[in-house]
Image (tube, grey):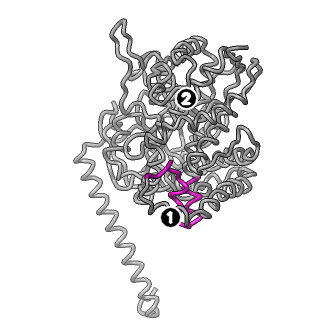
Amino acid sequence: MDLASLPHVAKAALGLVSIFILYQVYLQLTVGRQRRALKREKGTLPAPWFSGFRDHILGLDLFSKNIKLLKEHRLLEVVTARFNNDGVKTFKILLLGRQVHFTIEPENLKVVQAMEFKKWGLGSRRKFGFRPLLGDGIFTTDGGAWHHSREMLRPNFVRSQVGDIATFEKHVSNLIRAIPCDGSTVDLSELFFRLTMDSATEFLFGESTQSLTKTSSEGFAESFSRSQDYIANLARWGMMSYLFPANKEWEHDRKLVHEFVDHYVEKGLAKRSELLAEKSNTEKPGRYIFIDELVRQTTDRIRIRSELLNILLAGRDTTASLLTNVWFTISKRPDIWAKLQAEVAGLDGELPNFEQLKELKYLKALLTESLRLYPVVPANSREAEVDTTLPLGGGPDGSAPIFIEKGGILAWSVYAMHRRKDYYGEDADDFRPERWLDDPATGKKGLRPGWEYLPFNGGPRICLGQQFALTETSYTTVRLCQAFGKIESRDSQPWTENLTLTCVNLGGAKVGLTAHDA
């Protein structure tokens, strides 16, 4: 081709393309030099590849295997076995063409979640998956937007709010009335999800859905649960999820969920003028209601709905899942039931206050152990915002630092980490609340874990609602113990993972309860 014969415009375009290509080559060479320098400075070594897959181009075999395991409700179990079988605490995998580092090293998680928090973001895949349902809120944003959402939410979880036992009692009383007291079989899990819906909407919207006494929110609950399953797969598999059969109800579910919350958004906006007037009042404010603060700040209906949905997800599902897992275990363990009843008997039938709940040491140990063996959020991930390193996982013995390039993914399994025998002993797979308690007879102290115990994350993104969830779970458990003197399991199956955005026992908590005075 004779360049001299080309039109001036074509020559200019060809020149620009050449300059762009040369610039990209220069950038790659520069980035390459910087990365090599960082690796030398930190002494990084590569993490080992996971030994159980053969497709080293796209990782499609591992992808298909994980899909199968998810459907079989065995993914968490098998991921734990992968670490144990390979004898490492960090390894690399290829998943849909992306290299992912997988770890159960507490030191790595301390760096990611706390020490170098700003170097890590939620990642494009999580945002891609969650936003169609949740919009922009605390679980779908980074940086300034995330910080703003968190600061608005923080007053909802101050001591005066979390310790509002009277509000819990109103809903727990409805729960107790909904449970057969003659030993008939009931799935407590279904009732727990209604309970936490009622309490969460009261704290967030200023009024409860009253789903334990009404049926008006049943369609919402079903749609909310199904749509979470759908967006969980979007977040896991990204664009590849579109190659698989979609949730047939997805569009209907999303519309119903949005319309349900929009109802409260409109009610909140209708009293905006009144709320703005209250804001200027110097008198001591009443109970903090999240939606009131939102409508004071904005009239953007989509933003208000998104912020509410993000927190409703956390307030309803995580606590209900924890309660389900706890009561499934209680029904299988007469020894735990007996110890709980003995501890609760010390309240002499009185409703416990916030301070008394904190003094129930065996109950606290029971919840802590449930969150260890059955963490409600059993896995998580972050995406590197810059080239960076982590302290462990490289080399033959995993003791060297590893390099993570910008855009690289670090995933971790809380489920597997909580089963590490070097932290929790040879009986790490056993459900034993006593491991958290001091033993006065021997002087042995109960476990005081650090970053190896992460049911609520850590660092700046640590769960704001942690104390709220534990208080609601504790109060509900105490009141059920006061109301019922006998419990029987009506489920012959072991605990089985049901993993969506949260994790709960697949079979719920099917039990028979008999009242104390029956």
Which residue bears the numbered disc 2?
475
Structural crowding at the residue carrying mark 2, measured as other residues with C-alpha within 10 Å and reported as few (<14), some (14–19) or many (≥20): many
498 left or right, relative to 248:
left
Quadrant in which residue 452 is drawn: top left
Q: Is residue 301 magenta?
A: yes
Mark 2 vs 1, N-terminal side: 1
Quadrant in which residue 48 is drawn: top left
Secondary structure type for disc 1: helix
Residue range of the region highlighted in magenta in the rendering: 284-308
Return the x and y of residue 174 as percentages of the image width and height: 68, 33
Return the x and y of residue 214 as percentages of the image width and height: 75, 42
**Residue pictured at 35% horizontal, 36% vertical:** 393
Which residue bears the numbered disc 1?
276
Identify which residue, 94 or 242, lies in the foreground.
242
Quarter placement of the C terminus:
top right
Q: Is residue 299 magenta?
A: yes
175 left or right, relative to 306:
right
**Residue pictured at 59% horizontal, 44% vertical:** 200
Majority secondary structure in the magenta region: helix
* Alpha carbon separation for disc pair 2 and 1: 35 Å
**Three-letter amino acid code of the residue under disc 2:** Tyr
